[in-house]
Image (spheres, rainbow, N blue to C red):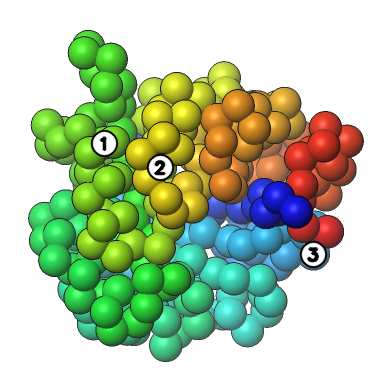
Amino acid sequence: MPLAKRIIPCLDIKNGRVVKNVNFHHGTWDAGDPVELARMYDEQGGDEIVFLDINASWEQRSATLDILSRAAEQVFIPLTIGGGVSEVEHVRSYLRAGADKVSINTGAVKDPDLINRSAEIFGSSTIVIAIDCKRGSDGGWEVYLQGGRTATGIDAVKWAEEVWRRGAGELLVTSMDADGTRGGYDLDLHQRLAEVIDIPVIASGGAGTLGHIAEVLTTGRADAALVASIFHSGQHTVSEAKAFLAQKGVPVRT
């Protein structure tokens, strides 16, 4: 039996509220309370919830634990939190506060050994490496840090290979070009990743229709789809997305 594909609502958090923007920086709108939304998506059949404190790395702080701990009391699907993780103790504190997985982005690029140390202590299954990237003029993709503010010159596919070999259990890969546009995921990016790494990849950035989700899980060969705008706006529910995927023959958890 093929492994079930996952639908993962994403909650970008700024100043205690869920926000959404386009290409990381433009057209920000308030989507609501993070704990209330997480509970709603749990009830709709979401497979996991991802909380991303989008300014934490830029402001050189760790993500807030209050939202995580309150959500852990009310939500019964796996929770991932990311934002400002730069040391092993951050991972430990998030797991103790109720997270099932911890997402590391900027901190991993600045200190790649953080991946090894965290995986050895807490297990690879708890470590998600987030990669934010833009397509370059050479046809590849460049890694960006600090909420998409800082270019690195690092090739995203090569970085994905490295973090896999360092012990990451999963990747969360966001196309900054597609983020918030509702124009579809970057299928080329996810096809390329599927060719070179052997851990699950969560595709992020660009979902505008249920067809886009189906495309990235089939043509794009992603293991899970991160979705924000079309759920937050009420355009579709998680339940509708799963019903659509099942009709298309995509295996989903029910």
The three-letter amino acid code for the residue at tag 1 is Ala
Residue displayed at 69% across by 32% down: 214
The residue at the point 63 percent across, 84 percent down is 73
* Residue 101 position in % (x across, y down): 45, 70
Distance between mark 1 and mark 2 Cα atoms: 9 Å
For residue 65, which quarter of the picture?
bottom left
Q: CA distance from mark 3 to mark 2?
A: 26 Å
The residue labelled by disc 3 is: 43
Q: Which mark is residue 156?
A: 1
> x%, y% of residue 158?
22, 38
Q: SS of the residue at dot 3? A: helix
Q: Where in the figure is residue 188, as x and y percent of width and height?
A: 45, 22
> Quadrant location of the N terminus?
bottom right
Observer able to see residue 27 = no
Total marks placed: 3
Image vertical order of residue 64 relative to residue 245, above or below: below
Which structural element holds mark 2?
strand
Viewer-side residue, 24 vs 246? 246
- Residue type at numbered disc 3: Glu
Q: Amino acid at mark 2?
A: Val
Q: Is residue 200 left or right of residue 42?
A: left
Could you tell me which quadrant the C terminus lies in? bottom right
Q: Give the mark nearest the N terminus, 1 or 3.
A: 3
Furthest-bottom residue in view?
96
Confirm or deny contact between disc 1 and disc 2 (CB under 8 A): yes
Sequence order check, earlier mark of 3 and 2:
3
- To which residue does mark 2 refer? 173
Residue at (37, 78) in percent of width and height: 123
The kind of secondary structure element at disc 1 is helix
